[in-house]
Amino acid sequence: MKGRHIMVWIKKGLIFSPDGQYDWVISHSMLPIPERRGEDLYRVYFSGRDRFNRSLVGYVEIDLRNPKEILKISEKPVLGLGELGTFDDNGVTPSWIVDYNGKKYLYYVGWNQGSTVRMAEMAGLAISTDGGESFNRVSRAPILERTDKEPLSLLAATCVLIEDSVWRMWYVSGIEWVHRDFIRYDIKYAESNDGINWNRDGKACLGFKSKEEYALARPSVLKEDGVYKMWFGYRQAQQTYRIGYAESKDGFIWDRKDDMGGLDVSESGWDSEMVEYPCVFNHEGKRYMLYNGNGYGRNGFGYAKWED
């Protein structure tokens, strides 16, 4: 009797650890986004933090054949803070990148310090015409505005795919502030004709699986053989982030299958306390996941491969 092959994520370790290499990356490397630049060459955008603990977007470049060897680090951020008083004046964190008509569309999270609540996170968009060395905002306002159905200032962490000229987005949306430091949020869906102006109905496409769960974060979606596959972070009461998995036939209604494609913490090391912010991509017939570990990227980002 032949043995049954079971595919799982095999952790391969840290790729990049922030250590004050430049002023924009004194600490942290949050929400890594891979972008193929050559045969095995990838640029990974992420946000480091400066000495004032503000997030700024830069990148490293790696070869997937030996990803732990950093080939290049951007000396300066490719996207900095917004103007004083705007939605992103206290931090910017990348969430997705799309190549379209010779331009690079960088979807990002804009941060504000809070007042009655701890913080605000809104989705922004910046476009590069120089190959990703710099990005210019399409607007000083967020691309997802608050509505009566989504009145809270947590509309961010977007994932965007283009299908048949329709731009499809899955994003994180706030449900309620339980108190100043505790917000509940799930994942919703939007569509666009240009990647800038979005239509949405405020209905959750991926909700909680139990009463203990209260946060769904950073969706990463692939479509394979007619099936949509989503990896995301989730939190429960008395438990830090873990990485979950869901499938869908249409991208609207999702079936949670965390045990089939999720990722748990390690027994020790840089991702022993939490795993979060997955970004999954395929390369030459193999599947990879970039993700953060302890302290929301305090120790850097690492990767896993989908293997027997």
Image (cartoon, rainbow, N blue to C red):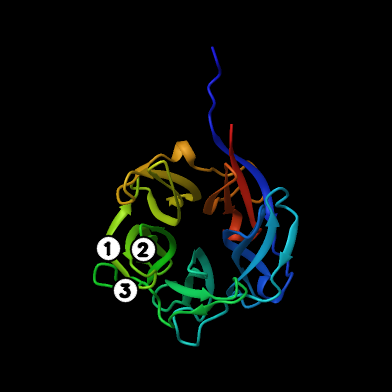
1 and 3 marks in contact (CB < 8 Å): no
Q: Quadrant of the C terminus?
A: top right
Left/right of residue 108 with respect to residue 151 in the rendered view:
right
Tag 1: amino acid: Gly
Return the disc, 1 or 2, that comes first in the chain's sequence. Answer: 2
Q: Position of residue 306 (x, y in %)?
A: 57, 39
Mark 3 residue type: Arg
Residue 80 occupies quadrant: bottom right
- 160 to the left or right of 47: left
Identify the residue at image location x=53%, y=73%: 92
Q: Which residue is outermost to the front?
A: 101
- CA distance for labels 1 and 3: 10 Å
Disc 1 vs disc 2: Cβ atoms closer than 8 Å?
Answer: yes
Specify few, some or many for label 3: CA neighbours under 10 Å numbering under 14, 14-19, or 20 or more.
some
Q: Secondary structure at mark 2?
A: strand
Horizontal arrangement in the rendering, residue 21 relative to residue 289 (left or right): right
Reading the image, the residue beneath label 2 is 173
Residue 16 seen in the current view: no
Residue 92 is tagged as none
- Residues at circles 3 and 2 in contact by the CB criterion of under 8 Å: no
Residue named by callout 3? 146
How far is mark 1 from mark 2, CA to CA?
8 Å
Closer to us: 265 or 13: 13
Q: Secondary structure at mark 1?
A: strand
Residue highlighted by disc 1:
202
Q: Is tag 3's residue or tag 2's residue first in the polypeptide sequence?
A: 3
131 up-or-down from 280: above or below: below
